[in-house]
Amino acid sequence: MVLRSLKGSLCLLFLWFATTIAIDIHGRVEWNDVCSNATELGRAKAILDSGSEYAGSITASGDFTMCVNRLLVPANHPNTSALSVFSFDVPSGTYLLSIITHDYTFDKLRIDVHNPADAQTVEVRPYIEGTPLHPPSTVILPYPIKVSAKGKFAYFSPPDSFNLITMLSNPMTMMMVFGGIMMLATPYMMKNLDPEALEEMKKEQAKVAGVQKAIASGNFKGGISAIMAAADEATAATVAKTPQKSGKSKKSKR
């Protein structure tokens, strides 16, 4: 008998404690130019602290309520008096409210649930993601909560259109264009060259072709000899072109 009475007292104490620390949180999504109605919003819900324990679905009118774990108690229970329903809603504490939806972004809000002796209150403050919760902001927003969509997610990026400047700024394209210009301009440049310079250029090309042919055939000795011969000829030509200074010897008079 004593054990049963003790159980009843503990149950009443537990239910009284739960009702004194819990409160429903009400809010509303206000439609704007970004999201004008519930059809555009789609399936969405409001959650506290990124969890599913305290969550409320957003209705067609935009309203939501954080209300969970309702405990039904028979009205004829000897220890419940006239109470039949108790709500284990949102306990006292500090939370972050987020609106979860597929297509739209919402600002997060800081929710402070207080339980003073005379009344239960909810304070709503703006929150910038990544900043500490304490100390709290001095700005207090009106309650019930009012939130609105700030932007829409862009899941599709259109492909880039044709851009001539971008194509020409590509290094490979620039090399191809330069090569084409040189190929077209070379015949005109050859016609305007001095015959002696043209003959000298042909000789140089023949020497380079001979060296490349010797190396390609595996005759490294012949290739090295051709390179050395070309170097000697270039040195001799440089010496021949250098003017020599002539000096007159002076005889000393006795």
Image (spheres, grey):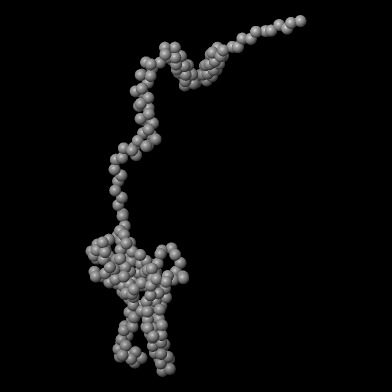
Q: In which quarter of the image is the C terminus?
A: top right
Up the image or down, 99 lies above or below 237; here it is: below
Up the image or down, 57 lies above or below 105; here it is: below
Residue at image point 52% right, 20% down: 220
Residue at image point 31% right, 90% down: 82
Residue placed furthest toward the right = 254
Q: Position of residue 178 (x, y in %)?
A: 37, 29
Q: Position of residue 253 (x, y in %)?
A: 74, 5
Q: Position of residue 5 (x, y in %)?
A: 41, 92
Q: Where is residue 32 in the image (x, y as percent from the top left)?
A: 26, 64
Residue placed furthest toward the bottom = 1
Q: In which quarter of the image is the N terminus?
A: bottom left
Residue placed furthest toward the top = 254
Residue at image point 29% right, 68% down: 29
Number of callouts: 0
Q: In this view, does 105 lie to the left or right of 239?
A: left
- Can residue 182 be seen at all in this image of the molecule? yes
Q: Nearer the viewer, residue 12 or 251?
A: 251
Q: Which of 137 and 155 is in front in this view?
A: 137
